[in-house]
Amino acid sequence: MIAFRAGRIAPETWDTGSWVDVGRTVGSAIGPRLGEILAIAITAGGMISAFSMFNALILSYSRVPIAMATDGFLPKVIARRTRRTGVPWVAILVCSVAWGLCMKLGFTNLLLLDTSLYGLSLLLEFAALIALRFREPNLPRPYKVPAGVLGCILISIGPLAILGLAFYESLSDEGAKKGLMVSGITVVAGLVLYFVAIWISPTARN
């Protein structure tokens, strides 16, 4: 907001990539060439940040399909690693192709898809935390939430409220409904594939 006010830019004109325009406007007010230099710097910084985050996500999230393949929910071939370094090359390749195909959805739909799926996975973590309090009350816990089960429930209310508010706001946006539809289809497909994997795989069933 400070940059907007300094550049005398109306907040309602904000759109994807507006930081570059703000940098150009603010820089031009200081020097004739500083605007273009600042715009290029912001663009380069965004590209470096996106590449670094994508690289980190590939290295971390590729472990999820490996764990699923080990448990029998995905084909065993996904858990293959290179002999010398142990890099899970199949999982990295599969994830990279899947994420590349998602680029067709557009920025807004990808943002909604990421937010909704991450929010639902976070709620599952809270649900598992509460369920374990009942199913495994004597489980060793080096880190405990104060107030027992009630404390676990209370700390889950905030994220649940934020997710519900975001979902409600998205329903009033026509452009966001496609993203929500894709998220819903993804969740339903995941549930169906989960039970299919349990049915056909003895490892997953156990």
Image (spheres, rainbow, N blue to C red):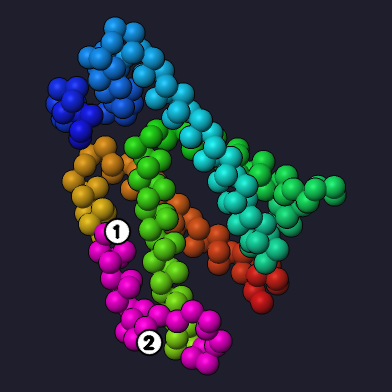
Q: Which residue is mark 2?
A: 148
Q: Picture quarter containing residue 179?
A: top left
Q: Is residue 154 magenta?
A: yes
Horizontally, residue 86 falls left or right of residue 55, namely right
Does 87 sit above or below residue 64? above
Label 1 sits on residue? 163
Which one is closest to the eye, mark 2 or mark 1? 2
Instruction: Looking at the picture, tell me which residue is in the foreground, 183 or 33.
Output: 33
| Quadrant in the picture for the N terminus | top left
In this rendering, would 192 be left or right of 182? Answer: right
Q: Is residue 181 visible?
A: no
**Classed neighbour count for the residue bearing mark 1: other residues with Cα under 10 Å, few (<14), some (14–19), many (≥20):** some
As displayed, is residue 10 above or below residue 142?
above
Q: Is residue 84 at all visible to an observer of this figure?
A: yes
Q: Amino acid at mark 2?
A: Gly
Spot occupied by residue 93 in the image (x, y as percentages of width and height): 67, 41
Residue at position x 38%, y 58% from top? Answer: 119
Residue 125 image offset from top left, x and y in percent: 45, 69
- Where residue 191 appears, as percent x and y from the top left, is 49, 62
Sequence-wise, the earlier of marks 2 and 1 is 2
Confirm whether the magenta stretch covers residue 12.
no
- The vertical placement of 43 against 155, above or below, is above
Examine the rendered structure and indicate whether residue 166 appears above or below residue 139: above
Q: What segment is highlighted magenta in the picture? A: 136-163
Look at 65% across and 61% down and name the residue there: 67
Q: Quadrant of the C terminus?
A: bottom right
Q: Residue furthest right?
A: 83
The extreme top residue here reads: 32
Q: Nearer the viewer, residue 50 or 165?
A: 50
Which residue: 51% across, 61% down? 192
